[in-house]
Amino acid sequence: MSSHIVLRMRDVNMSVRTGHIFTKRKQVLRNINIDIRKGECVAYLGANGAGKTSTFKAISGLSSIDSGSIIKHGTLSIMPETPYFYKHITCRDLLSLMGKLNTVDDINQKIDAWSHRLNITPIMDKRIGQCSKGQVQRVGLAQVLMSEPDIVILDEPLSGLDPVGRRLVISVLLEQSMSGQTILFSSHIIDDVEKICTRAIFIRNGSIAHDEFVKREQYRTPPQTALEKVFMDVNQC
């Protein structure tokens, strides 16, 4: 892992508008301070509504922040929890279109390579609307990775996947991490998280509650030192 910081958040605060008639603002992020270095694979963990997706939207520029600063070095690609693609086009056409928009070289070769790696070759000529949630999830992951970004942000990348799909995606993320790509992802599946991440950041009620570095070989240690126990302690479950 490099000492070069590729993502820095300093004192980030963010609020969103709630209500339809009598609107008010709800603070969703409170004084977020995070440094992520090149090559880290960071799990961003928390209960539903803790602020994980809000953080990702702030980093990617999909939502504006109220105060603070976010500095990124390098290219960034994000996959939301539920990728929304045009349902009438094929998976191949989607990846080709997104590849062109991101000025990807050797588009067809990369489409073939990633479709093979993510086991979606049989559905490449099917329309998006004909694919299952898990298949669309893997198409979305192919779309993110084929552009070879410096920073990858994945919101619940294991959501909607069957056990085989989960093992496959875990394997791919491990390979990308080992190759030096910087990955920031969220998940509620702690057992899977422990197989992937080198660091875990826990968020609760919009604030960072815990931050620790993790060695992948640590997964064989007794249960009381596992990330699941930290998750339970942080969220007082």
Image (cartoon, rainbow, N blue to C red):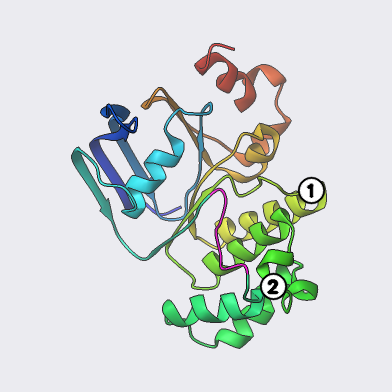
Q: Position of residue 135 (x, y in %)?
A: 72, 60
Question: What's the residue at 66%, 76% (across, down)?
Answer: 90
Question: What's the residue at 81%, 47% (across, down)?
Answer: 163
Q: Nearer the viewer, mark 2 or mark 1?
A: 2
Residue extending furthest front? 21
Q: Is residue 160 rendered magenta in the image? A: no
Question: What's the residue at 74%, 66% (across, down)?
Answer: 130
Q: Position of residue 127 (x, y in %)?
A: 69, 72
Residue situated in front as seen by the camera: 29 or 133: 133
Q: Is residue 46 left or right of residue 29?
A: right
Residue range in magenta is: 81-87
Residue extending furthest left? 67
Q: Is residue 176 left or right of residue 150?
A: right
**Most frequent secondary structure within the magenta stretch:** loop
- Disc 1 secondary structure class: loop
Q: Which residue lies under the disc numbered 1?
A: 162
Residue situated in front as seen by the camera: 90 or 137: 90
Residue 54 visible (yes or no): yes
Residue 112: image quadrant is bottom right
Q: Which residue lies under the disc numbered 2?
A: 127
Q: Is residue 120 left or right of residue 57?
A: right
Q: Is residue 215 left or right of residue 70?
A: right
Q: Is residue 170 above or below residue 200?
A: below
Q: Is residue 33 above or below residue 164?
A: above
- Disc 2 secondary structure class: loop
Q: Position of residue 31 (x, y in %)?
A: 26, 29
Q: CA distance from mark 2 to mark 1?
A: 21 Å
Q: Is residue 214 above or below residue 84?
A: above
**Crowdedness of circle 2 by 10 Å Cα count: few (<14), some, many (20+)?**
some
Q: Position of residue 203 (x, y in %)?
A: 43, 28
Name the kind of residue labelled 2 in the image. Arg
